[in-house]
């Protein structure tokens, strides 16, 4: 049986898939299986995946008959995985040679529920190392402590699902799946839930993942209503946190994150399709009304003046509503530490 399952969703990435699959070939190992999930590609990606699957030891192809999105594609890989650990890679990113063996060894040595890694951001020919914002490296830490203070960049502000390795016990009995109703922001909700559910995590000083930004397959390049799925994502998170044992400690970080997201999108609303921009403004006002108002008041006092003024204007457009009651259900655009850390969102790769 494999020790590590690598889940790789593909959708219409024919220009990049050969580089991605070639990097898997430079990471083959008897302990590693590759789950190649083609989410109903129409541009020749299917043929590229099939060609490379025959050359990759331990590769299996999972094919969706209709396009279901990246959340469903990752879930299909999770359901098929046989490894003790799982990791993810997007279909237009790539690994350095030997990265997966180093990742697996580090995870086994630490024996915690999950570990996150640094990564290399690739924009054209520019390479920048992005570090996971953990206080320590190669040390087992409390996942809830990794959520951290509202005003700081913390581990829930590092929503790169593929920059990590996860023990299969996290996925037992259908747990830790991606919310398929979300076309974007599913990764941020998933990372929050990971920190709420797990018992121990670590950050690793590895940066063998290359993350390709600004490609045409990225969902951050779209200008339609799919960009607005952060509303249901963060509403689901707030519902879950209201019922959590640490609600008082965790809600301020989640509310500030949500506010930062609202400000980020409204500041670039003119770039969106007109109907999407109108809906964004209306839903922003409504979302501010759904937040716990005492926490929102403190957030607006602490946040920077520019975003604070924007959020107050939006809030004034919607009468205050009673705080949403806990539903008890569990359910991933920038997170909410400082202003400097919330204006860059990771590309949402289409699947």
Image (cartoon, rainbow, N blue to C red):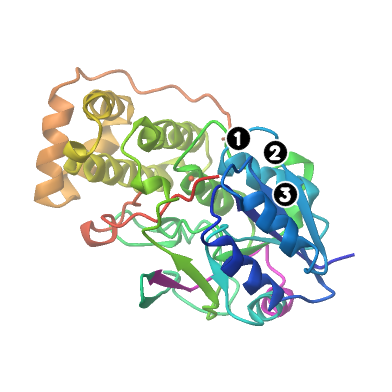
- Taking the spot 69% from the left edge, 57% from the top edge, the residue there is 49
Q: CA distance from mark 3 to mark 2?
A: 14 Å
Res. 169 in view: yes
Q: Quadrant of the N terminus?
A: bottom right
* Badge 2: residue crowd in 10 Å (few <14, some 14–19, many ≥20): some
Between marks 3 and 1 in the image, the one whose residue lies nearer the viewer: 1
Kind of element beneath mark 1 = loop
Q: Answer yes or no: do the residues labelled 3 and 1 have beta carbons within 8 Å?
A: no
Q: What is the distance, in whole Å, between disc 1 and disc 2 at their CAs?
A: 7 Å
Residue at position x 75%, y 56% from top?
168
Q: Which residues are drawn in magenta? A: 105-122
Nearer to me, 182 or 169: 182
Q: Which residue is mark 2?
A: 64
Instruction: Please say if the residues under marks 3 and 2 sit with CB atoms less than 8 Å apart.
Output: no
Please provide percent x and percent y for residue 188. 46, 48
Q: Identify the residue at image location x=60%, y=66%.
A: 18
Residue 20 is situated, as x and y percent measured from the top left of the image, at 59, 66
Are dots 1 and 2 in contact, CB under 8 Å? yes
- In this orientation, which residue lies closer to the viewer: 243 or 133? 133
Disc 1: which residue: 68
Residue at the far right: name it: 1
Q: Residues within 10 Å of mark 1 (few under 14, many from 20)?
A: some
Residue 177 visible: no
Sequence order check, earlier mark of 3 and 1: 1
Helix, strand or loop at label 3? It is helix
The residue tagged 3 is 78
């Amino acid at each position: 049986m494999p020790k590590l399952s690598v889940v790789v969703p593909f959708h219409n990435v024919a220009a990049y898939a050969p580089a991605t699959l070639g990097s898997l070939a430079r990471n083959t190992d008897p302990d590693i299986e590759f789950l190649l999930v083609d989410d109903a590609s129409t541009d020749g990606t299917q043929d590229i995946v099939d060609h490379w699957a025959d050359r990759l030891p331990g590769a299996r192809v999972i094919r969706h008959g209709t396009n279901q999105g990246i959340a469903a594609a990752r879930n299909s890989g999770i359901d098929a995985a046989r490894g003790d650990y799982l990791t993810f890679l997007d279909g237009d990113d790539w690994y350095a040679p030997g990265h997966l063996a180093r990742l697996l060894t580090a995870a086994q040595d630490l024996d915690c529920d999950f570990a996150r890694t640094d990564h290399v951001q690739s924009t054209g020919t520019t390479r920048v190392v992005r570090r996971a914002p953990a206080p320590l490296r190669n040390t087992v830490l409390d996942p809830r402590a990794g959520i951290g203070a509202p005003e700081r960049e913390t581990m829930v502000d590092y929503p790169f699902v593929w920059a990590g390795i996860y023990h299969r016990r996290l996925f037992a009995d259908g747990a830790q799946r991606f919310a398929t109703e979300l076309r974007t922001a599913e990764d941020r909700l998933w990372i929050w839930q990971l920190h709420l559910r797990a018992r121990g995590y670590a950050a690793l000083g590895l940066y063998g993942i290359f993350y390709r930004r600004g490609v045409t397959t990225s969902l951050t390049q779209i200008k339609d209503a799919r960009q607005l799925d952060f509303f249901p994502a963060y509403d689901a998170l707030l519902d879950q946190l209201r019922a959590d044992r640490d609600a008082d400690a965790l809600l301020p970080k989640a509310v500030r994150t949500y506010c930062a997201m609202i400000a980020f999108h409204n500041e670039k609303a003119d770039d969106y399709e007109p109907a999407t921009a109108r809906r964004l403004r209306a839903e922003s006002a409504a979302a501010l009304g759904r937040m716990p108002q005492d926490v929102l008041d403190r957030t607006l006092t602490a946040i920077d003046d520019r975003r604070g003024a924007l959020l107050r204007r939006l809030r004034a457009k919607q009468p205050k509503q009673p705080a949403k009651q806990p539903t008890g259900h569990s359910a991933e655009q920038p997170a909410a530490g400082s202003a400097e850390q919330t204006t860059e969102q990771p590309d949402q790769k289409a699947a």
